[in-house]
Image (tube, grey):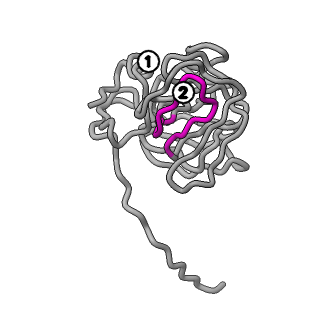
Amino acid sequence: MTMQVKRKKDSRVVKCIVHRVADIPGGVTVETASLGGKALFEGTPLGKGKDGLYNVVKTAQIVTAADAAATAYEVAKGHHFKTGDHFSAGGANGQTIASIDKSDPAKDVITLSATLGKAVKVGDTAFESAGANTTLKVSPEAVAGSNYDVDPDGDNLWVDAWLIGAVRESNAPAVSDAIKSTLKGIVYF
């Protein structure tokens, strides 16, 4: 057996959970097959799914305003949307995602099969709806406590999940007012 030395550059991790009070003992298992991103970030809302697995509450921050007739929406990198998901923002009923262009290093462009029918402002939070409505597909119960790499072809992730704590919203993944009100033990500041 030979010794191998691997050179690797670490990057600084920006934390968003500043105070942790109560977690789910033993953590939770997050289903990764439905995730469109390569990383699960600290502070990502999680909710119960099927067979004891947890699912990610998919969100994205709108980075460019769009009018009521638009079908393409520019969002910040780091989301978990995939083609076929229902995309809702600005109080509009969700529409099916037809394609996602990830070629721009600064943002992604999500194109829908039909317009949302409402104007969307910069800073709005888009989320995965349960269909052609404004209901969250996954009801959030906790937030992920650390950053994790996601292998879409690999195993599900074991994640430490926090029920009560304080989260710095500027460093956390985008969350809407509906998500904040459902996460009763998490204080965003």
- Is 9 a magenta residue? no
Mark 1 and mark 2 residues within 8 Å of each other at the beta carbon: yes
**Of the residues under marks 1 and 2, which one precedes in the sequence?**
2
Residue found at x 43% / y 38%: 173
Pick the quarter of the image with the C terminus.
top left
Q: How busy is the neighbourhood of tag 2: few (under 14 within 10 Å), some, or many (20 plus)?
A: many
Name the residue carrying label 2.
127
Name the residue carrying label 1.
178
Residue found at x 52% / y 40%: 75
Residue 163 in the image, given as x and y percentages of width and height: 40, 27
Disc 2, SS: strand
Mark 1 is on which residue type? Ala
Q: What's the CA distance linking mark 1 and mark 2?
A: 10 Å
Q: Is residue 153 above or below residue 180?
A: below
Residue 27 in the image, given as x and y percentages of width and height: 50, 36
Residue found at x 59% / y 39%: 80
Q: Is residue 31 above or below residue 47?
A: below
Extent of the magenta region: 60-76
Mark 2 is on which residue type? Phe
Residue found at x 35% / y 29%: 22
- Which sits in the foreground, 80 or 10? 80
Pick the quarter of the image with the N terminus.
bottom right
- Which sits in the foreground, 172 or 10? 172
Residue 123 as seen in the image, left or right of residue 28: left
Disc 1, SS: helix
